[in-house]
Amino acid sequence: MRTRTAITLASVAAVGCAVAVPAGTAFADGMGSHATHVSTVRTAASSVNGTISRSEVISRAQYWLKTQPPYSETHYAPGPEGKLYRQDCSGSVSMAWHLGTSLTTWQFDPHSSQFAGIDHQISWSDLQPGDALVQNAQYNHIALFVGWADKAHTEPIVIEQYDYGHSQTQRTWNSSYAHEFTPIRYNKISGGGGGGTPTPPPSTGGKYYENVWKSAPSYRAASTASRAGTLNAGRNYFYCQAKGQEMNAEGYHNDWWLKTDDDSGNSGVWVNAIYVSSGTNDGSIPGVPQCAGSTGGGGGHTSPTAKIYKSVWQSASSYTSPTSMKTIGVLHAGSNYFYCQTKGSELNASGYQNNWWLKTDDDSGNSGVWVNAIFVSGGSNNGQIPGIPAC
């Protein structure tokens, strides 16, 4: 359910990308499981070996998270447009960057004698989603950079093909392992680091990670009236925060509450900010958005203003409302933000059906329009999208 400890990756095979994973390794929510919403072959926005946006790079990497080709140094799987790429770590990055062939890790590394010259080294502070990390010295692993798991920017979140018996996976590396790698950037990537300012999606899909310094009671509303369960100490995610009843505990007091899923199996419950490390008395937690239109009372929702990013696996029509079925524009495939979701008319498209709709701003210039959950990765037939609040 959540990432609690740093991942230690200790051993690396001498050839290829195989990386040992210790017992208890936690993977990103919804990643590495059976695929849903596997799209049919579609035309890519970029051309082979051409300029490509960061959002398309991430979308292409997420395509293999959906289709789940198993790791292999000899077999090939199609990218979104049908072109085949080798099913190992360097093949995965080659596919994400839409290269003309599956390069080896040596060819990606600027310090290798086999360097292909298609990328260049950057600083750690300059890393942006869609860049990559290639291993120093041995040159036997590479992964696509997605974002940071911590505020200090020491634990990168990556998408990678890393070992036999596994498939495309998103996970977090700890700092010591990460610094065995060199950050690199594709020469033809657009948006940041050479042309424009990108809007990278939160890699956690609308979940904001903070340290909980002591196991905390969870409640069904932002008050102590109805105890739900317990949130264990450690690194935990939160969706948003709101003011509620003031709580006095552990020698502190606070009237701010954070919405999360606890370790007792309860979803959408509340934990007081007292238990979050970066808080102060009666102060909100920096970096966690406010639950728009809500006081945390659990008595209904208004339309949130926080933008929560998800992958749209196929360009989708936008509608004026979740019930009108009147199209108004288009939301392009790739990483897109959503405000909230609600039930409406059932839509049947691309071999799926769903009656959940997500509020967003489309690529046709329309604000506050609706897109069906069919087109958002991580959903299921007539199922809502995890991590998106109700409208």
Image: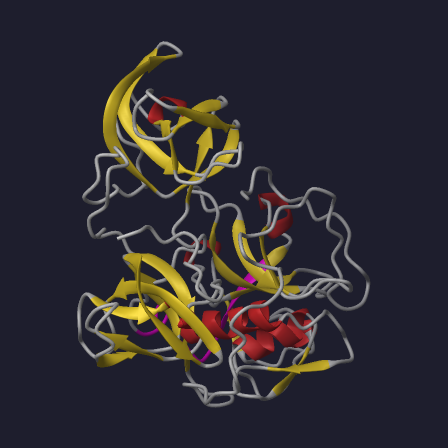
Horizontally, is 133 left or right of 266 in the view? right
Residue sitting at x 48%, y 60% = 146
Q: Is residue 86 above or below residue 243?
A: below
Task: Answer with the quarter of the image where residue 176 lies.
Answer: top right
Task: Answer with the quarter of the image where residue 300 lies.
Answer: top left
99 or 222: nearer the viewer: 222
| Region of the chain picked out in magenta, as a range | 182-195
Horizontally, is 318 left or right of 264 in the view? left
Task: Evaluate whether residue 272 shows in this view.
Answer: yes
Quarter in which the N terminus is drawn: top right
Task: Answer with the quarter of the image where residue 132 lies.
Answer: bottom right
Horizontally, is 279 left or right of 59 in the view? left
Task: Evaluate whether residue 112 shows in this view.
Answer: no
In the rendered image, the residue lying farthest to the front is 345
- Indicate yes or no whether the magenta region holds residue 324: no
Q: Is residue 9 above or below residue 63?
A: above
27 or 173: nearer the viewer: 27
- Indicate yes or no whether the magenta region holds residue 187: yes
The location of residue 30, given as percent across then percent down, is: 54, 56
42 or 116: nearer the viewer: 42
The location of residue 110, given as percent across then percent down, is: 60, 71
